[in-house]
Amino acid sequence: MDIGLSDYIIAIVTTDKNMKSNTVPIFYAKDRDDLERRSLVISKCVMGMVHDALNDTFIIVKH
């Protein structure tokens, strides 16, 4: 029986400059194009998946 965390958030990428987190790194993007570009590059580097969390915020999750 495998017990433990297997999915976790690697990073948050957002255009919302007011978003704060004490546990997950946040990357701020200028606009929607920058948001998508940054999310893709970060996800490739950490071998994670990008998920749209609405309101111009993406989360990068390791599955």
Image (cartoon, helix red, strand yellow):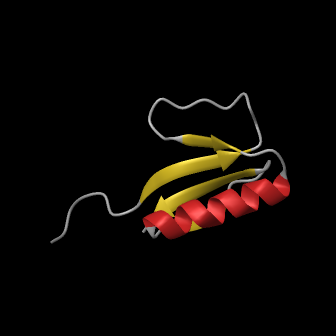
Residue closer to the observer: 14 or 52: 14
State the residue lying farthest toward the left. 1
Q: Residue at x 55, y 60 (%)?
A: 42
| Residue drawn at the location 54% of the way across and 32% of the way down | 21
- Give the image location of residue 13, x and y in percent: 65, 49
Residue in the image at 54% along x and 65% along y: 43
Viewport quadrant of the N terminus: bottom left
Q: Is residue 43 above or below residue 24?
A: below
**In the figure, residue 50 lies in which quadrant?**
bottom right
Residue 21 higher or lower than 13, as above or below? above
Residue 61 horizontal/vertical position (percent): 50, 61
Which residue does the image show at 47% across and 53% down from the upper left? 9
Q: Quadrant of the C terminus?
A: bottom left
Q: Quadrant of residue 36?
A: bottom right
Q: Position of residue 60 (x, y in %)?
A: 55, 58
The answer to whether 4 appears left or right of 13 in the picture is left
Question: In the visual, does 38 lie left or right of 42?
Answer: right
**In x, y percent, where is residue 48?**
49, 67
The mark total stands at: 0
